[in-house]
DNA sequence: ATCCTATCCTGGCTGC
DNA sequence: TGCAGCCAGGATAGGA
């Protein structure tokens, strides 16, 4: 399930293929993929054609294809959100199933967007900041300091897990890395944000960053076969997961079987001993 | 602010 | 074996 580390992996590995290339033609095979201009395939394609990809970056779980005219004048961006099952790859899978968008580029390169469950969305906009305006801070950015996190969390009272999944509170975490971060911080996902002391908050802050950094270093998690890298390879972080998908297996810290519970209607994995609900 | 439900989707699994 | 029904999961919307 693509979260921040998976999207970061996609961006890093796509960039050398896409940077500086011109968009020659675009095909859309499922109109509802196009979020902006909403479901207007012809306008979407006409807008993109002729523009150049000047950079490939990330914000939260969005891939950002920065666009320019004549490789010089900034124009705007094409945003791609993979949601559950989206894949951005540089070669076709051999089967046309689930192919939603195709970008034909200069230099005989082609970018394919596959999306089995049709949740993924694509935007083309002159003002990407407007689409991204509601997102919370980037957890690995220099601006996301411990004092910033302390202040934000002190203003909340809800359960930790739904809070960390809230993209307006902090951007980029999903089900896997929230569970992993809470385990590493030894905090129960149902703990209320206003019951944490300063040391709890510090551990959570460190755990979020460490969890994301390690996952990026391992090129993301391919847990269910959904996430693949642009070259078709899988991630490696699934081998390093401590709790996610580890139900009934012994906790690496204390040996107690990992439990799968439900928190905020979401499947959740914990060690009941290491993460007590005080 | 917080919490719950519904919606969007399909492949895979469960149970009869 | 076959098939209906359920579930996961990111994000958002609407109601309590």
Image (cartoon, coloured by chain):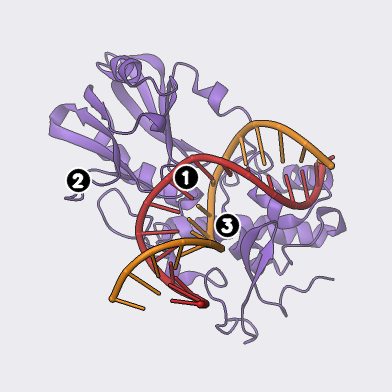
Chain colours: A purple, B red, C orange
Identify the residue position indicated by label 1 in the image: A83
Q: Alpha-carbon distance for marks 3 and 1?
A: 12 Å
Which quadrant, please, contains the C terminus of chain A? bottom right
Q: In this view, does C11 lie to the left or right of A34?
A: right
Q: Quadrant of residue A235?
A: bottom left
Residue sitting nearer the eye, A197 or A44 = A44
Residue at horizontal 31 percent and vertical 17 percent from the top: A42
Chain under callout 3: A
Q: Can residue A80 be spotted in the picture?
A: no
Residue at image position (57%, 72%) is: A243
Q: Do labels 3 and 1 share a chain?
A: yes
Discs 1, 2 touching: Cβ within 8 Å: no
Q: In this view, does A89 lie above or below A128?
A: below
Task: Give the chain letter at badge 2.
Answer: A
Q: Are there few (<14), some (14-19), or many (20+) residues within 10 Å of tag 1?
A: some
Residue A10: where, in percent of width, then height? 37, 46
Mark 1, secondary structure of its residue? loop
> Residue A120: which numbered mark, if any?
none
Instruction: Examine the rendered structure and indicate whether residue A228 appears above or below residue A31.
Output: below
How far apart in space, not on screen, are marks 1 and 2 (Cα)? Answer: 20 Å
In the image, A177: left or right of A160? Answer: left
């Amino acid at each position: 399930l693509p979260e921040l580390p998976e999207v970061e992996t996609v961006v890093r590995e796509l960039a050398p293929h896409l940077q500086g290339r011109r968009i020659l033609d675009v095909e859309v095979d499922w109109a509802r993929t196009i979020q902006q201009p909403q479901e207007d395939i012809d306008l979407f394609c006409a807008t993109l054609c002729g523009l150049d990809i000047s950079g490939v970056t990330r914000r939260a779980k969005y891939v950002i294809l920065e666009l320019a005219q004549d490789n010089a004048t900034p124009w705007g961006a094409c945003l791609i959100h993979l949601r559950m099952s989206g894949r951005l790859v540089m070669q076709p899978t051999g089967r046309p199933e689930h192919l939603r968008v195709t970008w034909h580029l200069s230099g005989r390169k082609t970018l394919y967007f596959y999306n089995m469950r049709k949740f993924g969305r694509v935007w083309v906009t002159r003002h990407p900041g407007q689409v991204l305006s509601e997102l919370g801070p980037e957890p690995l950015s220099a601006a996301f300091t411990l004092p910033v996190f302390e202040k934000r969390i002190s203003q909340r009272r809800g359960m930790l897990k739904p809070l960390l999944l809230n993209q307006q509170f902090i951007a980029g975490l999903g089900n896997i890395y929230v569970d992993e971060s809470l385990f590493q911080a030894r905090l129960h996902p149902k703990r209320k944000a206003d019951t944490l002391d300063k040391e709890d908050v510090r551990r959570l802050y460190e755990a979020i960053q460490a969890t994301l950094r390690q996952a990026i270093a391992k090129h993301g998690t391919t847990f269910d076969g959904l996430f693949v890298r642009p070259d078709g390879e899988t991630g490696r972080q699934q081998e390093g997961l401590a709790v996610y998908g580890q139900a009934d297996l012994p906790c690496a810290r204390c040996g107690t079987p990992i439990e799968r519970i439900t928190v905020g209607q979401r499947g959740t994995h914990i060690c009941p001993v290491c993460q007590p609900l005080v």
